[in-house]
Image (spheres, rainbow, N blue to C red):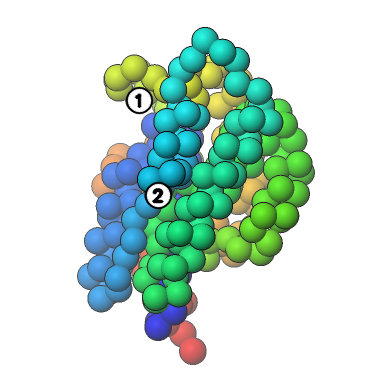
Amino acid sequence: MASGRFISVEGGEGAGKSTNIEGVRARLQAAGLRVVVTREPGGTPLAEEIRKLLLAPREEAVCDDTELLLVFAARMQHVERVIKPALARGDWVISDRFTDATIAYQGAGRRMGVDRVQALRTLLLGDFAPDLTLLLDLPVDRGMERLAGRGAPDRFEMEDREFFDRVRAAYLQLAASEPGRFRVIDAARPLPAVQAAVAQAVEAFLLQSAAP
């Protein structure tokens, strides 16, 4: 396993990505791998500034195309300055969200069109994609209940139920279309069960990556 691998962790609001990413990191490090944990939007100083622009509630309505292009601007900085260099060093990268999130949130949630976002992804990233994507799937009602216990919502968390229904449906459709890359985890179960399922998926991927 000299070459690095790229793992993304996806899911709707309240799915438990942060908690489970730490479990993935620990398992990979236990296997003796160098691990870089990052996030989107963000991951570099410039991309983190763009993240603030995207998430902050504001009086001025944000045009859908403006939002989409800001997301990809942050992503390209992230890919070129963090992800690709890490993979070239042989490190394993875990990203909290990647392009699938844009397809789900902007393509489906914003109704911009999944095919349109896919076309932009192809234009900018070509065939660059995660080697493994863990999709933490959670019913929208449960996710919104979890959000209610947090602090002030960001601009995306303020969206309505129908928005998140579209996001979840798009994620599941993506997973169905790429079963070789996605592992769908039922995130509505108790945390130990979710962590066990994540660990099993990572263990299987480690064995697969070690195969000649």
* Residue sitting nearer the eye, 172 or 70: 70
Q: Which residue is mark 1?
A: 146
Q: Which label sits on residue 63? A: none
The front one of 198 and 29 is 29
User: In the structure shown, which secondary structural element does the residue marked by tag 1 occupy?
Assistant: helix
Against 153, is 212 above or below?
Answer: below
Residue 162, picture quadrant: top right
Tag count: 2
Locate residue 61, reporting x and y percent.
60, 15
Residue 148 position within the rendered picture, expressed as x and y whole percent measured from the top left:
35, 18
Q: Is residue 181 visible?
A: yes
Q: Callout 2, which amino acid?
A: Thr
Residue depicted at 56% across the width and 39% down the height: 71
**Residue 24, image quadrant:** bottom left
Residue 206 visible to an observer of this rendering: no
Please name the amino acid that badge 1 sits on: Arg
What secondary structure is found at the residue carrying circle 2?
Answer: loop
Assess disc 2: are there few (<14), some (14-19) or many (≥20) residues with their C-alpha within 10 Å of its C-alpha: some
Give the labeled residue for mark 2: 44
Of residues 41 and 179, the one nearer the viewer is 41
Crowding near pointer 1: few (<14 within 10 Å), some, many (20+)?
some
Rendering coords of residue 17 (x, y %): 37, 43
Q: Residue at left 40%, top 62%?
A: 93
Q: Is residue 204 left or right of residue 63?
A: left
Q: Position of residue 98 (x, y in %)?
A: 52, 49
